[in-house]
Amino acid sequence: MSENSGNSFDPKNFVEAAPHSPSQGAGGPGVPGQPAQVVQQAQAGVQPPAQEPKKGKGKVIALVSILGVVIVGLCVAVGLIISGAFAKETEKSKKPSKTAKKTTTEESDDPTDDPTDDPTEDPTSETTEPTADPTSDTSGTTAATSGTTDPNLQPEMVSSIDQVSPELLDTLISVSKERFETDPDTQLPDKVTLLNFNYLGMAITDEFWEGDDGYDFYTYNLWLLFQVQVTDSTGGQAQERQFFWYAYFREVYTDGTYDSSVDIAYKPVMCFDNWSISGLQSVARFFKEAGTVVETNVDESLILPLDGKPYSPEEDVRVTKESELTSGQFKKMQEVAEERMNNYERPSNTTVRIDKMTLLGTYFGTDNYESTIVALVYEMSLVYQGNTYVYYWYAGFYGTFTGGECLTSYMLRPTMTIDYGEFTATGLPTVDDVIAEIEGWGYRNNVENNVDISLSTVGFIFPNSDKEEISEDRIKALSDEGLRMAINEIWARHGYIFRNQDILDYYRQFAWYEEKIPADEWDSHGQDYYLNDIEKKNIKKMTDERERRA
């Protein structure tokens, strides 16, 4: 037995048999002439048989003894099997070899490290191999078969405000301010200076992701809200203005890391009289922008007063008519629409020139969900190889509010393409087609239509020839063809139906031209019947110039 068995050595329990020494002869010590067995039996109180057994009987006794030993051995073996004595060895034989499991790990430099040794066999071992599951997603653990950190293991994602340490919060605020100072959408214009960049708190939102492998999980995002106060001197006299701005952080972890690759693409804009900037008009708009909020600690009591007055939140009311638009909103929407056309939606042929982009007015519509669209409708005039082409285009804006906020980063635009043979243009043939398409998107409730065809200047040489006298110098500067068309456009404005098919086809392309008065009817009444005094004077000047040239 080993000392590890737990049993101590006791000489009282150890009986050593007397040695058989040839020097003692046939008798044992103290009893000469007698065999040692007899002496031992006598000492033990066992009486020897009276006579020696016969040889035949001895063979039977030997055979019976052997059978007895065999039977006893079988019984002992069965007992051991039943008691589970072999279970350990059987279980050990079923264990997979760790040699194959360690083939991908680095070889140990320790000569005592036997890769085939099962550390669970030795209860005294002080350096047993960890039994952790290598697929465990416990932060800070390592794979059982590798000495390096599992790349699939990540620190815990921040899902509660309590998990944001002061150090992490300071980092997020610092990064937010840096974003505000460097983002092109938040560049303050000249004569506008920053007064306060005031942190008000954060909101945590969650997102549900459905993985391709069937593994669904949630991610959490942080939104930090700031009050921004500026001094605005763009209008001459300095005044304080404020708006609210947020920084969005995707998947923030407790170790201070976060996913900075994704940001909000569609940010609302605050529109002031002479400038605009990415921002919100109220704290309430921030929560609607963030969406489903899991937790927030935004504190409105931290909002600084403006011009000595406490914070008074703007009402969250959507603009439903043109009179509710601020001049800043209207100006910003025009700027974005024209930039979109000039940079992205030009005709397919690069030699086509956009001659005019005339705003004809606005169209307001709401859908069944009280969502509002403000559509700016334009008349487009193109020039290609000396010819004029006219079509209509619109830019529809969502999320326009009465406090000056609007969403301009996304707009609804025409889906139809007009084919002119040598080039194509995205738009619609008539203004009526524009209105029909907008209403086709579902915006047909509470409609205010301010589109005015008379505002069109396309097709006119002198758009105001019915309102102001044209100077002789401007008339003399015209070509012969220009002079002819300048006279005809005055008649066309009244709906005169030209006998000359070429002229008629030319004016038919303009939405403002309506065929109302046949040539015979015009002749019977005379032009004095249809023209006002200013138009008559301009006609006289132009016909005199034409006769002079003849």
Image (cartoon, rainbow, N blue to C red):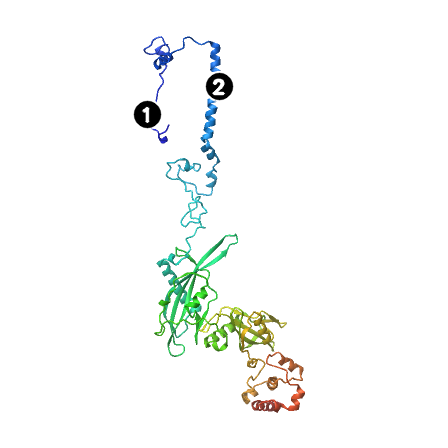
- The quadrant in which the C terminus is found is bottom right
Q: Is residue 489 left or right of residue 300?
A: right
Q: Is residue 321 visible?
A: yes
Q: Is residue 352 visible?
A: no
Amino acid type of disc 1? Asp
Q: Secondary structure at mark 1?
A: loop
Q: Nearer the viewer, residue 446 or 115?
A: 446
- The quadrant in which the N terminus is found is top left
Determine the image quadrant of residue 31: top left
Determine the image quadrant of residue 293: bottom left
Residue 257 position (above or below residue 546): above
Q: Secondary structure at mark 2?
A: helix
Q: Of the residues tagged 2 and 1, which is closer to the observer?
A: 2
Residue 531 position (above or below residue 307): below
From the image, tell me which residue sits under label 1: 10
Q: Are dots 2 and 1 in contact, CB under 8 Å?
A: no
Residue 208 position (above or below residue 498): above
The x, y position of residue 145, in whole percent, is 44, 43
Q: Nearer the viewer, residue 167 or 469?
A: 167
Which numbered circle lies on residue 393?
none
From the image, tell me which residue sits under label 2: 67
The x, y position of residue 256, in whole percent, is 39, 57
Amino acid type of disc 2? Leu
The x, y position of residue 354, in whole percent, is 56, 75
